Amino acid sequence: MMIPFNKPYITGKEVHYIYDAVATGKISGNGKYTKLCQQYFEERWGFKKTLLTTSCTDALEMCALLLDIQPGDEVIIPSYTFVSTALAFVRQGAKIVFADSRKDHPGIDEDKIEELITSRTKAIVPVHYAGVACDMDKIMDLANRYGLFVVEDAAQAVDSYYVGKDGVKKPLGTIGHLSAFSFHETKNIQCGEGGLLGINDDRFTKRAEIIWEKGTNRAEFFRGEVNKYGWVDIGSSFLPSEITAAFLWAQLEELDKIQAKRIGIWNSYYAGLSEWGLARGVQIPLIPDYATNNGHMFYLVCPTGEYRTSLIKHLKENAISTVFHYQSLHKSLYYHTKYEGNDLLESNRYSECLVRLPFYYELKSTDFSMIGHSILLK
Amino acid sequence: MMIPFNKPYITGKEVHYIYDAVATGKISGNGKYTKLCQQYFEERWGFKKTLLTTSCTDALEMCALLLDIQPGDEVIIPSYTFVSTALAFVRQGAKIVFADSRKDHPGIDEDKIEELITSRTKAIVPVHYAGVACDMDKIMDLANRYGLFVVEDAAQAVDSYYVGKDGVKKPLGTIGHLSAFSFHETKNIQCGEGGLLGINDDRFTKRAEIIWEKGTNRAEFFRGEVNKYGWVDIGSSFLPSEITAAFLWAQLEELDKIQAKRIGIWNSYYAGLSEWGLARGVQIPLIPDYATNNGHMFYLVCPTGEYRTSLIKHLKENAISTVFHYQSLHKSLYYHTKYEGNDLLESNRYSECLVRLPFYYELKSTDFSMIGHSILLK
C-alpha cells in the first residue's frame, strides 16, 4: 500500500448539504450555499465582496476582465507558478513579464520586481507559494508608486496571514485589489474543482457580479434593483452549481479542525527534517517573520536535480509517493519564444530540485514517522 | 402551493455515485465519471470526441478558441438566443452578425443566413431552440459553399435528431464541426451547472483536450504519450469536478425514462392546447418534418405582448408559474451600439410574446390538466 501524495478530505456532511440543496429545488448557481460560502469569507477574513467560481483559473480570468487587460498590457508574475496565473492574463492579450523566485523561498523575489516595471505594466500578480505570504508591504508600495493593480494569487493561501510593518495581521487575499483562491482537491479546503474571487476595492464590486453572470445584470434583477435583466457587459459563466457550493460549505464549517491538523503535520515534518536538511544541503520551507503557516504543503529543495530523482525513487521503493511541482513558465513550449527577459535561475532551480511530501488531513502520525525515517535513511 | 416553472429531477443515484467518486480518492476533473459521461455521448450518439465542461458557455468558449476566432472575424448567430451564444465569441473579439428567427418557429431563419455572409464570416452558430432541429442541410450546404465552420448550440437539444434529405436520422450536435450542450438545472439531463463540447472533426480533437486542461498536455502525459507535461497552448480550466460528473452520470443512466416522461408531458400539452391556440391566434410549438421532439420545452407565442402579460398574470392567480425567455440580443444594452444590421422583427416578436409553461419530470398529470384548464379559461 503506497502512501499517496494527496487524499481529499471529506468531513461527512458534504452529501447532507447536497441533499438539502436539491430539496430547495434550485441547484444552479448563486443559491443558498453559494451565499453561505461567500459570507463566510467576507465575514471571517474581511473581504469587501467574494464570488465563488468554478476554478481558481476562472477567478484569475475574472481579475483580467475586471482590470480591462488589453493586448500589449504587461503583467508581472513569477515564473515558478501554475500555468493559470499566466494563462488568465494571456487570454486577454497580456504580455507576461516573468520574475524570478527568492533564493530562500520559491515565492516571487520582491526586490526584483521594480526593474521589470515599464510604462505598459498594468498589474503585479504575486503568488503566495505553499500558502506563505509574499512581502506585501514591498509589493503594495511598488504598486502605489507606479499606479499598478495587485492581484494576489492566493490559490494555496486560505487562512494564511501577512503581518505588515504596521504590525497588523492581514489575511492573504485581502491586501491586493483582487485575489483568487483555489478549492482544487489538493487544497486545504476543497470541492474537487472550485475557486473564489476576492474583491477589496469597491470599484470592482458591481461589475464583478455582472461578469460572473454571463455579462448580465441578473443578480441585480433577483435583488429587485432592476426591472428586467439583459446583456450589459463582457463575462462568462463563472459561477459553480449549488452542488459544488454545498460540498464546499461542509468543508468551510470544519476549517479550524482541518487547519489544526494540517499545521500539526507540517510541524512534525519540520521538526523531523530540519537537521537532516541542514546536513545534506536540502532547503526546507521558510516561514518569514511577516508570514504565518497555513499547513498547506511541505516541500524539500534538493541540492541537485539528480538528488531529487534519487530521493523520489528511494521513497517510491519505500511505498511513499512524492511529486515535484511547476516547470518555469518562461521556458515553457508555449511562452519561451514570446519571452524577452533573462533566464530565471532560481525559478529553474525550484523546477529541477523541489519535491513535495505526502500531505493530507488523514495522514497518520505513523505515516509521517515512516516518511521521516525513510528520508533520514537517504 | 404554486406549480413551479422548473424542478430539477433527481434520480436518487446521484449521491451514491458522488460517494463512489470520493472513495476513489480523486474528485478533481477528468476521472472515472467524466470518462463515463463522455463515453456515453460518444457511443450513443456517435461523436468523434466529447469533453465535459463546467457550463455550456464554457463549451462555446472552447469552440471560439478552437476556431481561432480573431478580432474582426464575423460569426452569424440568431438574435433570439441566450447571451452565451454570442458572448463566447465576443470574448475572442468576434463581431456578431445577428440573424432573425423563423415566422413559424423561434429558431434561426435558415433562408436569411446567406445574405449575412461576408468575406470575414468565419462561423455560423445555429441554436436548436427548444431542442427542435434547425434545417441543418441548408446550413451545412451554406458552410460548405462558403468555407465556414458550423457550431451547433445544442444547449437544449440532448437526444434530439435531424432527418436530412438523405433520410438519415442524425443526432443534434453531431452534424456541425463542433457543438455545445448544457446540463443546467432547467435541462432534460442536468447537474445544476454543466456542459459538454462535442467534436465531429478530427482536426480539433487533440487541441481541444489541451485547451480543456489549461493549455497543458496533461491528458497526453497521463496516457503515457509524453514524458512530462507543460504549457503548450492557450486554454482555461474548462473541466468540472468528479462530483459534478458523478451527479450527471446518474442522470444519463436514466435518460430513456426521463425522455419518455417528458415527451409524454409535451404531447399532453400539445393535445390539450392545439385547438385553443388556433382559435386565439396563439402560436404553439412546431416540430418540422425533418426534426424530432426531445420533450425539452412547451411554449406559447401570444398574439401581443399585452396578451402575454395578461396570460402570465391569469396563470399566476391560478398558482401556475410561467416565464418568458430571451430578449433580442441585437437590442441589448451591451450590443445595440455595436450592431450594424437591420432590426429583426421575428426575434423581437418572440422576445415580447413567447411564454414557457411549467415543464419538469415530476409534473403530475393532474398538474398539467389543471394548467391546461386554466389556459382554456383565458
Image (spheres, coloured by chain):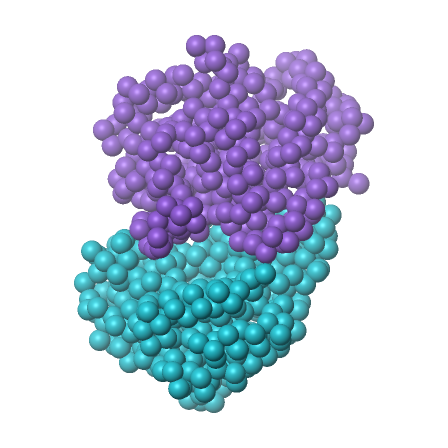
Chain colours: A cyan, B purple
Q: Quadrant of the C terminus of chain A?
A: bottom left
The quarter of the displayed image where residue B368 is located: top right
Q: Position of residue B307 (x, y in %)?
A: 62, 27
The residue sitting at 64% across, 37% down in the picture is B251
B107 horizontally vs A360: left or right: left
Q: Quadrant of the N terminus of chain A?
A: bottom right
Tell me if I can see residue B53 in this picture: yes
Question: B65 above or below A73?
Answer: above
The quarter of the displayed image where residue A108 is located: bottom left
Question: A317 above or below B1?
Answer: below
Q: Nearer the viewer, residue B205 or A204?
A: B205
B363 horizontally vs B211: left or right: right
Q: Nearer the viewer, residue A54 or A82?
A: A82
Q: Nearer the viewer, residue B69 or A320?
A: A320
Task: Give the total number of marks visible in the rendering.
Answer: 0
Q: Position of residue B53 (x, y in %)?
A: 49, 44
B336 horizontally vs A15: left or right: left
A334 horizontally vs A16: left or right: left
The residue sitting at 27% across, 42% down in the picture is B70
Question: Looking at the image, which residue sits at the far top?
Answer: B166
Q: Nearer the viewer, residue B200 or B63?
A: B200
